[in-house]
Image (cartoon, grey):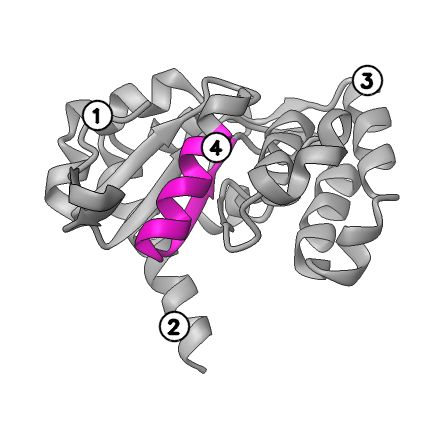
């Protein structure tokens, strides 16, 4: 689940870490990119991937880390309806396991990207943008009806509406069109700093 967890168990089940934050990434390919760039050691963080929709052990593990370490936690997913649904699963829980949500969900998790607005902000070429399928549109419209998008994360709702309005999606890897290490050297550090600046206001 992680390339460099940077923590250890102490007596009496205490958990300590030198990490500054936890980064959850949607898929294995992005995890490997971070591993190749030695992202964990350079940025003092814990990186976890659920390889798509996270299973219960991954979600329990993340919840344990957040509860024990009290670190900020960020999530990086594809800019498509399924990436957004994975993000929502981490934060709000699975609709199929609503009965167990309070033990698995991580309400502190923050959406790091990729956002529909990133395609303009980072000058993604049109070839990197894919049209939403009919199923994508149906899924997005269904997610927009979820009450927590209105009540807890209206800014997430705005990005989801933008995706539907534009009718396009893109994968995290598209950001590497600028350079192989753009994701690890520019995008992720920049997004984290942006969130920190907003939180300090």
* Residue holding disc 4: 60
Residue hosting label 3: 135
Using residue 121 as the reference point, say whether residue 132 is left or right of it: right
Q: Spatial distance from mark 4 to mark 2, Cα to Cα?
A: 29 Å
Vertical relation: 173 (above or below) 199: above
Q: In the displayed structure, would residue 91 be above or below residue 134? A: below
Q: CA distance from mark 3 to mark 4?
A: 30 Å
Of 191 and 4, the residue lying toward us? 4
Secondary structure at badge 4 equals helix
How many residues crowd mark 3 within 10 Å: few (<14), some (14–19), many (20+)?
A: few
- Picture residue at 63% right of the left edge, 34% below the top: 89
Q: Is residue 180 visible?
A: no
Label 4 environment density (alpha carbons within 10 Å; few <14, some 14–19, many ≥20): some
* Relative vertical location of residue 130 with respect to residue 145 in this rendering, above or below: above
Q: Quick one: 20 or 173, which is closer to the camera?
A: 20
Q: CA distance from mark 2 to mark 1?
A: 28 Å
Segment tinted magenta in the rendering? 59-77
- Mark 4 and mark 1: Cα distance apart in space: 18 Å
First along the sequence among labels 3 and 4: 4
Compare marks 3 and 2 and give the one earlier in the sequence. 3
The reply to whether callout 4 and callout 1 are in contact (CB within 8 Å) is no
| Nearest-to-viewer mark from 4 and 1 | 4
Residue of label 1: 3
Q: Could you classify mark 1 by the number of other residues whose Cα lies within 10 Å: few (under 14), some (14-19), or many (20 or more)?
A: some
Q: Residues within 10 Å of mark 2 (few under 14, many from 20)?
A: few
Residue at image position (46%, 41%) is 63
Q: Are marks 3 and 4 in contact (CB under 8 Å)?
A: no
Residue that label 2 marks = 197
């Amino acid at each position: 689940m992680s390339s460099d967890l940077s923590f250890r168990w102490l007596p009496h089940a205490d958990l300590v870490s030198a990490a500054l934050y936890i980064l959850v990434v949607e898929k294995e390919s992005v995890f490997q990119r971070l591993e190749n760039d030695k992202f964990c050691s350079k940025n003092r963080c814990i990186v976890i991937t659920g390889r798509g929709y996270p299973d219960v052990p991954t979600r329990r593990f993340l919840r344990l880390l957040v509860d024990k370490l009290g670190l900020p936690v960020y999530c990086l997913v594809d800019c498509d309806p399924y990436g957004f649904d994975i993000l929502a699963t981490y934060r709000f829980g699975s609709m199929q396991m609503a009965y167990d949500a309070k033990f698995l969900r991580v309400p502190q998790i923050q959406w790091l990207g990729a956002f529909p607005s990133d395609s303009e902000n980072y000058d993604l070429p049109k070839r990197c943008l894919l049209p939403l399928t009919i199923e994508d549109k149906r899924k997005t419209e269904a997610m927009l009806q979820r009450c927590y998008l209105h009540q807890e994360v209206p800014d997430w709702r705005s990005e989801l509406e933008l995706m539907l309005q534009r009718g396009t999606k893109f994968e995290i890897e598209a950001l590497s069109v600028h350079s192989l290490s753009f994701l690890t050297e520019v995008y992720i550090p920049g997004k984290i700093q942006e969130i920190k600046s907003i939180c300090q206001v």
